[in-house]
Image: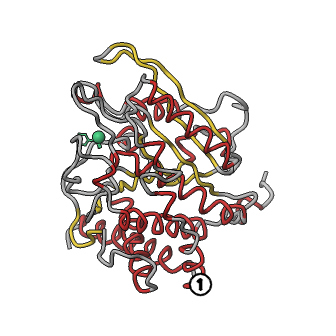
Protein backbone atom coordinates (compact mmCIF):
# COMPACT_ATOMS: atom_id res chain seq x y z
CA UNK A 1 0.00 0.00 0.00
CA UNK A 2 1.21 3.53 -0.81
CA UNK A 3 2.35 5.33 2.41
CA UNK A 4 -0.26 8.08 1.82
CA UNK A 5 -2.98 5.42 1.96
CA UNK A 6 -1.83 4.48 5.49
CA UNK A 7 -2.10 8.16 6.43
CA UNK A 8 -5.66 8.44 5.07
CA UNK A 9 -6.62 5.18 6.76
CA UNK A 10 -5.27 6.56 10.07
CA UNK A 11 -7.19 9.86 9.63
CA UNK A 12 -10.40 7.93 8.83
CA UNK A 13 -9.90 5.72 11.90
CA UNK A 14 -9.43 8.74 14.20
CA UNK A 15 -12.59 10.32 12.69
CA UNK A 16 -14.52 7.11 13.34
CA UNK A 17 -13.36 6.92 16.98
CA UNK A 18 -14.23 10.61 17.59
CA UNK A 19 -17.65 10.14 15.96
CA UNK A 20 -18.52 6.95 17.88
CA UNK A 21 -17.49 8.52 21.21
CA UNK A 22 -19.64 11.61 20.67
CA UNK A 23 -22.65 9.78 19.26
CA UNK A 24 -22.98 7.50 22.27
CA UNK A 25 -21.89 9.63 25.20
CA UNK A 26 -25.46 10.62 26.21
CA UNK A 27 -28.19 8.13 27.15
CA UNK A 28 -31.53 8.07 25.30
CA UNK A 29 -33.16 9.60 28.37
CA UNK A 30 -30.64 12.46 28.46
CA UNK A 31 -31.22 13.11 24.75
CA UNK A 32 -34.98 13.17 25.26
CA UNK A 33 -34.65 15.55 28.23
CA UNK A 34 -32.42 17.91 26.26
CA UNK A 35 -34.68 17.83 23.20
CA UNK A 36 -37.69 18.67 25.37
CA UNK A 37 -36.02 21.97 26.33
CA UNK A 38 -37.05 23.35 22.92
CA UNK A 39 -39.26 26.40 22.78
CA UNK A 40 -39.76 26.61 18.99
CA UNK A 41 -41.71 29.88 19.16
CA UNK A 42 -38.52 31.71 20.15
CA UNK A 43 -37.06 30.89 16.71
CA UNK A 44 -40.07 32.03 14.69
CA UNK A 45 -39.89 35.20 12.58
CA UNK A 46 -41.80 37.08 15.30
CA UNK A 47 -39.96 35.22 18.07
CA UNK A 48 -37.70 36.52 20.83
CA UNK A 49 -34.42 35.28 19.29
CA UNK A 50 -35.06 35.77 15.57
CA UNK A 51 -37.18 38.92 15.16
CA UNK A 52 -34.44 41.35 16.33
CA UNK A 53 -32.08 40.07 13.60
CA UNK A 54 -34.63 40.38 10.77
CA UNK A 55 -33.73 43.99 9.89
CA UNK A 56 -31.11 45.55 7.59
CA UNK A 57 -27.84 45.54 9.58
CA UNK A 58 -25.08 46.75 7.28
CA UNK A 59 -21.88 47.61 9.21
CA UNK A 60 -21.71 51.24 10.34
CA UNK A 61 -25.52 51.77 10.13
CA UNK A 62 -28.10 52.29 12.88
CA UNK A 63 -29.62 48.86 12.12
CA UNK A 64 -26.25 47.21 12.79
CA UNK A 65 -25.85 49.13 16.07
CA UNK A 66 -29.40 48.18 17.10
CA UNK A 67 -28.56 44.49 16.58
CA UNK A 68 -25.33 44.94 18.55
CA UNK A 69 -27.36 46.33 21.46
CA UNK A 70 -29.74 43.37 21.25
CA UNK A 71 -26.84 40.86 21.35
CA UNK A 72 -25.26 42.65 24.34
CA UNK A 73 -28.59 42.85 26.22
CA UNK A 74 -29.41 39.19 25.60
CA UNK A 75 -25.91 38.09 26.62
CA UNK A 76 -26.18 40.05 29.88
CA UNK A 77 -29.64 38.54 30.51
CA UNK A 78 -27.96 35.14 30.18
CA UNK A 79 -25.33 36.25 32.68
CA UNK A 80 -22.46 35.19 30.43
CA UNK A 81 -19.19 37.12 30.14
CA UNK A 82 -19.28 39.68 27.31
CA UNK A 83 -16.36 41.13 25.33
CA UNK A 84 -16.31 43.35 22.24
CA UNK A 85 -13.67 43.79 19.58
CA UNK A 86 -14.29 47.20 17.97
CA UNK A 87 -12.17 48.70 15.20
CA UNK A 88 -12.40 51.11 12.27
CA UNK A 89 -11.28 50.35 8.76
CA UNK A 90 -11.17 52.01 5.34
CA UNK A 91 -13.54 50.13 3.05
CA UNK A 92 -14.67 50.69 -0.57
CA UNK A 93 -17.56 52.79 0.84
CA UNK A 94 -15.43 54.83 3.27
CA UNK A 95 -14.31 54.52 6.87
CA UNK A 96 -16.52 52.01 8.72
CA UNK A 97 -16.77 51.01 12.41
CA UNK A 98 -17.05 47.27 13.07
CA UNK A 99 -17.71 45.37 16.32
CA UNK A 100 -17.35 41.64 16.91
CA UNK A 101 -19.11 40.40 20.06
CA UNK A 102 -17.84 37.46 22.13
CA UNK A 103 -20.01 35.82 24.81
CA UNK A 104 -18.51 33.18 27.11
CA UNK A 105 -20.20 30.96 29.70
CA UNK A 106 -17.17 30.32 31.96
CA UNK A 107 -14.35 32.72 31.00
CA UNK A 108 -11.92 31.04 33.42
CA UNK A 109 -12.19 27.67 31.65
CA UNK A 110 -8.91 27.11 29.78
CA UNK A 111 -10.43 25.64 26.60
CA UNK A 112 -13.37 26.78 24.44
CA UNK A 113 -15.85 25.24 22.05
CA UNK A 114 -16.61 28.23 19.83
CA UNK A 115 -19.94 28.59 18.01
CA UNK A 116 -19.96 31.43 15.52
CA UNK A 117 -22.13 33.28 13.01
CA UNK A 118 -22.08 36.72 11.37
CA UNK A 119 -24.67 39.30 12.37
CA UNK A 120 -24.13 41.90 9.62
CA UNK A 121 -26.20 41.92 6.43
CA UNK A 122 -25.08 42.62 2.88
CA UNK A 123 -25.38 46.14 1.46
CA UNK A 124 -27.84 46.31 -1.45
CA UNK A 125 -27.86 49.70 -3.19
CA UNK A 126 -31.38 49.60 -4.59
CA UNK A 127 -33.13 46.90 -2.60
CA UNK A 128 -33.86 45.81 0.95
CA UNK A 129 -31.81 42.78 2.03
CA UNK A 130 -32.66 41.15 5.36
CA UNK A 131 -30.55 37.98 5.05
CA UNK A 132 -32.88 35.69 7.01
CA UNK A 133 -30.67 32.68 6.31
CA UNK A 134 -27.60 34.93 5.92
CA UNK A 135 -27.16 34.94 8.87
CA UNK A 136 -30.14 36.00 11.03
CA UNK A 137 -31.23 32.40 11.70
CA UNK A 138 -27.70 31.20 12.58
CA UNK A 139 -27.39 34.08 15.11
CA UNK A 140 -30.79 33.22 16.61
CA UNK A 141 -29.67 29.58 16.83
CA UNK A 142 -26.65 30.64 18.91
CA UNK A 143 -28.95 32.30 21.46
CA UNK A 144 -31.34 29.36 21.42
CA UNK A 145 -28.40 27.09 22.19
CA UNK A 146 -27.11 29.28 25.02
CA UNK A 147 -30.49 29.81 26.72
CA UNK A 148 -31.62 26.21 26.38
CA UNK A 149 -28.30 24.71 27.57
CA UNK A 150 -27.48 27.20 30.32
CA UNK A 151 -28.72 24.98 33.16
CA UNK A 152 -26.87 21.96 31.72
CA UNK A 153 -23.71 24.10 31.60
CA UNK A 154 -24.22 25.12 35.24
CA UNK A 155 -23.53 21.48 36.16
CA UNK A 156 -19.88 22.25 35.34
CA UNK A 157 -19.10 25.10 37.78
CA UNK A 158 -15.33 25.01 37.24
CA UNK A 159 -15.03 23.34 33.87
CA UNK A 160 -12.06 22.53 31.66
CA UNK A 161 -14.05 23.29 28.52
CA UNK A 162 -16.68 25.97 28.05
CA UNK A 163 -18.97 27.33 25.36
CA UNK A 164 -18.12 30.62 23.66
CA UNK A 165 -20.37 32.40 21.16
CA UNK A 166 -18.82 34.68 18.54
CA UNK A 167 -20.97 37.15 16.59
CA UNK A 168 -18.88 38.43 13.68
CA UNK A 169 -19.46 41.82 12.10
CA UNK A 170 -18.56 42.66 8.48
CA UNK A 171 -18.63 39.21 6.90
CA UNK A 172 -20.13 40.57 3.69
CA UNK A 173 -18.23 42.50 1.05
CA UNK A 174 -19.35 46.04 0.21
CA UNK A 175 -18.28 46.08 -3.44
CA UNK A 176 -17.12 42.53 -4.18
CA UNK A 177 -13.52 43.64 -4.02
CA UNK A 178 -12.04 40.18 -3.36
CA UNK A 179 -10.44 39.03 -0.11
CA UNK A 180 -9.55 42.62 0.88
CA UNK A 181 -13.26 43.57 0.91
CA UNK A 182 -14.70 40.64 2.87
CA UNK A 183 -14.81 38.99 6.33
CA UNK A 184 -13.66 42.22 7.97
CA UNK A 185 -14.58 41.11 11.48
CA UNK A 186 -13.11 37.61 11.47
CA UNK A 187 -9.83 38.80 9.94
CA UNK A 188 -9.51 41.32 12.76
CA UNK A 189 -10.50 38.95 15.58
CA UNK A 190 -8.21 36.11 14.42
CA UNK A 191 -5.23 38.50 14.30
CA UNK A 192 -6.17 40.03 17.69
CA UNK A 193 -6.50 36.59 19.27
CA UNK A 194 -2.97 35.68 18.22
CA UNK A 195 -1.75 37.99 20.98
CA UNK A 196 -1.61 36.86 24.62
CA UNK A 197 -4.10 38.68 26.90
CA UNK A 198 -2.95 42.07 28.14
CA UNK A 199 -3.26 41.09 31.79
CA UNK A 200 -1.03 38.48 33.39
CA UNK A 201 1.50 37.89 30.62
CA UNK A 202 3.88 36.48 33.20
CA UNK A 203 3.78 32.75 33.72
CA UNK A 204 2.76 30.14 31.21
CA UNK A 205 -0.67 28.74 31.95
CA UNK A 206 -3.58 28.09 29.63
CA UNK A 207 -5.10 31.38 30.82
CA UNK A 208 -2.13 33.41 29.59
CA UNK A 209 -2.04 31.70 26.19
CA UNK A 210 -3.34 33.64 23.19
CA UNK A 211 -7.12 33.06 22.92
CA UNK A 212 -6.63 31.46 19.51
CA UNK A 213 -4.74 28.60 21.14
CA UNK A 214 -7.60 28.02 23.59
CA UNK A 215 -10.08 27.10 20.83
CA UNK A 216 -10.71 23.35 20.77
CA UNK A 217 -13.09 23.58 17.82
CA UNK A 218 -14.87 26.39 15.96
CA UNK A 219 -18.32 25.59 14.58
CA UNK A 220 -19.33 28.23 12.03
CA UNK A 221 -23.02 28.41 11.08
CA UNK A 222 -24.08 30.17 7.89
CA UNK A 223 -26.98 30.20 5.39
CA UNK A 224 -29.26 28.07 7.60
CA UNK A 225 -33.06 28.12 7.61
CA UNK A 226 -34.13 27.31 4.04
CA UNK A 227 -35.70 23.92 3.17
CA UNK A 228 -33.60 20.81 2.47
CA UNK A 229 -30.10 21.85 3.55
CA UNK A 230 -27.24 19.57 2.57
CA UNK A 231 -24.24 20.03 4.85
CA UNK A 232 -20.92 18.77 3.49
CA UNK A 233 -17.82 17.23 5.03
CA UNK A 234 -15.48 20.12 4.22
CA UNK A 235 -12.37 19.43 6.31
CA UNK A 236 -10.52 16.18 6.97
CA UNK A 237 -9.32 17.19 10.44
CA UNK A 238 -12.90 17.73 11.70
CA UNK A 239 -14.53 14.95 9.71
CA UNK A 240 -15.08 13.00 12.95
CA UNK A 241 -17.29 15.80 14.27
CA UNK A 242 -19.20 15.95 10.99
CA UNK A 243 -19.84 12.19 11.19
CA UNK A 244 -20.86 12.63 14.84
CA UNK A 245 -23.49 15.22 13.85
CA UNK A 246 -24.86 12.82 11.25
CA UNK A 247 -24.92 9.99 13.83
CA UNK A 248 -26.63 12.15 16.46
CA UNK A 249 -29.19 13.19 13.84
CA UNK A 250 -29.93 9.48 13.29
CA UNK A 251 -30.39 8.93 17.03
CA UNK A 252 -32.80 11.90 17.17
CA UNK A 253 -34.69 10.43 14.23
CA UNK A 254 -35.00 7.04 15.90
CA UNK A 255 -36.31 8.72 19.06
CA UNK A 256 -38.84 10.77 16.98
CA UNK A 257 -37.29 14.00 18.24
CA UNK A 258 -36.82 15.67 14.84
CA UNK A 259 -39.54 16.41 12.33
CA UNK A 260 -37.93 16.42 8.89
CA UNK A 261 -36.95 12.71 8.78
CA UNK A 262 -34.35 13.13 6.09
CA UNK A 263 -30.68 13.66 6.72
CA UNK A 264 -29.16 17.12 6.43
CA UNK A 265 -25.67 15.58 6.15
CA UNK A 266 -23.96 14.25 3.05
CA UNK A 267 -21.80 11.51 4.52
CA UNK A 268 -21.31 9.79 1.14
CA UNK A 269 -18.90 12.13 -0.60
CA UNK A 270 -16.11 14.41 0.59
CA UNK A 271 -16.54 17.99 -0.61
CA UNK A 272 -14.10 19.17 -3.24
CA UNK A 273 -13.35 22.87 -3.44
CA UNK A 274 -13.51 25.58 -0.83
CA UNK A 275 -16.04 28.07 0.45
CA UNK A 276 -14.71 31.41 1.62
CA UNK A 277 -16.25 32.53 4.88
CA UNK A 278 -15.41 33.75 8.41
CA UNK A 279 -13.52 30.54 9.19
CA UNK A 280 -10.70 31.31 6.72
CA UNK A 281 -8.55 33.53 9.01
CA UNK A 282 -8.89 30.85 11.72
CA UNK A 283 -8.06 27.91 9.44
CA UNK A 284 -5.01 29.86 8.28
CA UNK A 285 -3.92 29.90 11.94
CA UNK A 286 -4.54 26.15 12.41
CA UNK A 287 -7.81 26.36 14.35
CA UNK A 288 -9.96 23.22 13.69
CA UNK A 289 -13.22 24.25 12.03
CA UNK A 290 -16.56 22.59 11.39
CA UNK A 291 -18.36 24.64 8.72
CA UNK A 292 -22.13 24.23 8.94
CA UNK A 293 -23.09 25.85 5.65
CA UNK A 294 -25.20 23.95 3.14
CA UNK A 295 -23.96 23.29 -0.35
CA UNK A 296 -25.61 24.10 -2.69
CA UNK A 297 -26.44 27.44 -1.07
CA UNK A 298 -30.15 28.26 -0.55
CA UNK A 299 -31.88 29.40 -3.76
CA UNK A 300 -32.51 32.81 -2.12
CA UNK A 301 -28.80 33.44 -1.51
CA UNK A 302 -27.97 37.17 -1.83
CA UNK A 303 -31.43 37.90 -3.19
CA UNK A 304 -34.03 40.23 -1.62
CA UNK A 305 -36.17 37.10 -1.22
CA UNK A 306 -33.86 35.89 1.60
CA UNK A 307 -36.47 37.04 4.11
CA UNK A 308 -38.87 35.42 6.60
CA UNK A 309 -40.85 33.83 3.72
CA UNK A 310 -37.80 31.75 2.76
CA UNK A 311 -37.66 29.99 6.11
CA UNK A 312 -38.63 26.41 6.92
CA UNK A 313 -39.47 26.32 10.62
CA UNK A 314 -39.12 22.53 10.85
CA UNK A 315 -35.54 22.69 9.53
CA UNK A 316 -34.69 25.46 12.01
CA UNK A 317 -36.18 23.50 14.91
CA UNK A 318 -34.31 20.32 13.92
CA UNK A 319 -30.98 22.13 13.60
CA UNK A 320 -31.55 23.76 17.01
CA UNK A 321 -32.16 20.38 18.69
CA UNK A 322 -29.19 18.79 16.93
CA UNK A 323 -26.80 21.61 17.90
CA UNK A 324 -27.96 21.35 21.53
CA UNK A 325 -27.35 17.59 21.62
CA UNK A 326 -24.00 17.98 19.83
CA UNK A 327 -22.72 20.61 22.28
CA UNK A 328 -23.90 18.64 25.33
CA UNK A 329 -22.22 15.50 23.96
CA UNK A 330 -19.05 17.41 23.18
CA UNK A 331 -18.79 18.73 26.74
CA UNK A 332 -19.53 15.33 28.25
CA UNK A 333 -16.90 13.70 26.02
CA UNK A 334 -14.19 16.23 26.97
CA UNK A 335 -13.68 16.15 30.75
CA UNK A 336 -10.60 17.83 32.19
CA UNK A 337 -7.50 15.79 31.34
CA UNK A 338 -6.15 13.87 34.32
CA UNK A 339 -2.73 15.16 35.39
CA UNK A 340 -0.20 12.76 33.90
CA UNK A 341 2.02 10.81 36.29
CA UNK A 342 4.97 12.61 34.67
CA UNK A 343 3.61 16.03 35.58
CA UNK A 344 2.80 14.86 39.15
CA UNK A 345 6.14 13.25 39.84
CA UNK A 346 8.76 15.31 41.66
CA UNK A 347 11.30 16.84 39.37
CA UNK A 348 14.49 14.82 39.20
CA UNK A 349 17.70 16.78 39.82
C1 LIG B 1 -21.78 33.35 2.85
C2 LIG B 1 -22.89 34.03 3.10
N1 LIG B 1 -20.95 34.18 2.24
C3 LIG B 1 -21.53 35.36 2.11
N2 LIG B 1 -22.73 35.28 2.63
C4 LIG B 1 -19.62 33.84 1.83
C5 LIG B 1 -19.42 33.72 0.37
C6 LIG B 1 -19.29 34.85 -0.41
C7 LIG B 1 -19.34 32.46 -0.18
C8 LIG B 1 -19.09 34.72 -1.79
C9 LIG B 1 -19.14 32.33 -1.55
C10 LIG B 1 -19.02 33.46 -2.35
ZN1 LIG C 1 -24.09 36.65 2.42
- Ligand 2's quadrant is top left
Q: What residue is rendered at 45% in x and 38% in y?
A: 168
- Graded by Cα atoms within 10 Å as few (under 14), some (14 to 19) or many (20 or more), the crowding at tag 1 reads few
Structure colour scheme: secondary structure
Q: Is residue 232 visible?
A: no
In the image, residue 243 lies at what x, y percent?
37, 71
Q: What residue is rendered at 54% in x and 44% in y?
A: 213
In the image, residue 41 lies at what x, y percent?
50, 61
Q: Secondary structure at mark 1?
A: helix
Query: Nearest the camera: 180 or 66?
Result: 66
In the image, residue 234 lies at what x, y percent?
29, 57
Q: How many marks?
A: 1
Q: What residue is rendered at 36% in x and 54% in y?
A: 291
Placement of 58 over or under 12, stated as above or below = above
Query: Nearest the camera: 325 or 232?
Result: 325
Q: State which quarter of the image contains the N terminus.
A: bottom left
Disc 1 residue: CB within 8 Å of ligand 1:
no
Asked whether, in this view, residue 265 is left or right of residue 221, the answer is: left
Residue 292, image quadrant: bottom left
Q: Which residue is mark 1?
A: 29
Query: Nearest the camera: 148 or 219?
Result: 148
Asked whether, in this view, residue 153 is left or right of residue 267, the answer is: right
Q: Is residue 86 visible?
A: yes
Placement of 276 over or under 318, stated as above or below = above
Q: What residue is rendered at 54% in x and 29% in y?
A: 85
Placement of 52 over or under 122, stated as above or below = below
Asked whether, in this view, residue 260 is left or right of residue 272, the answer is: right
Amino acid sequence: MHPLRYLWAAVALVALVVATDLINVLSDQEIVDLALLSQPERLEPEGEFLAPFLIERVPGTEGNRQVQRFILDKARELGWFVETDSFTQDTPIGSIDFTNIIVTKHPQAPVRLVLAAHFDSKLFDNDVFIGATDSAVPCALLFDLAFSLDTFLDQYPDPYLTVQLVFFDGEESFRDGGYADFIWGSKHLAAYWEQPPLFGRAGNTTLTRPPLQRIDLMVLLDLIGAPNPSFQDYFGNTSGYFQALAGLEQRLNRLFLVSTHRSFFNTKTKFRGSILDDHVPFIQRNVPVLHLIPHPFPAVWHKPSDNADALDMLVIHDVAVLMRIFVASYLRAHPAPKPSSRAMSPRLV
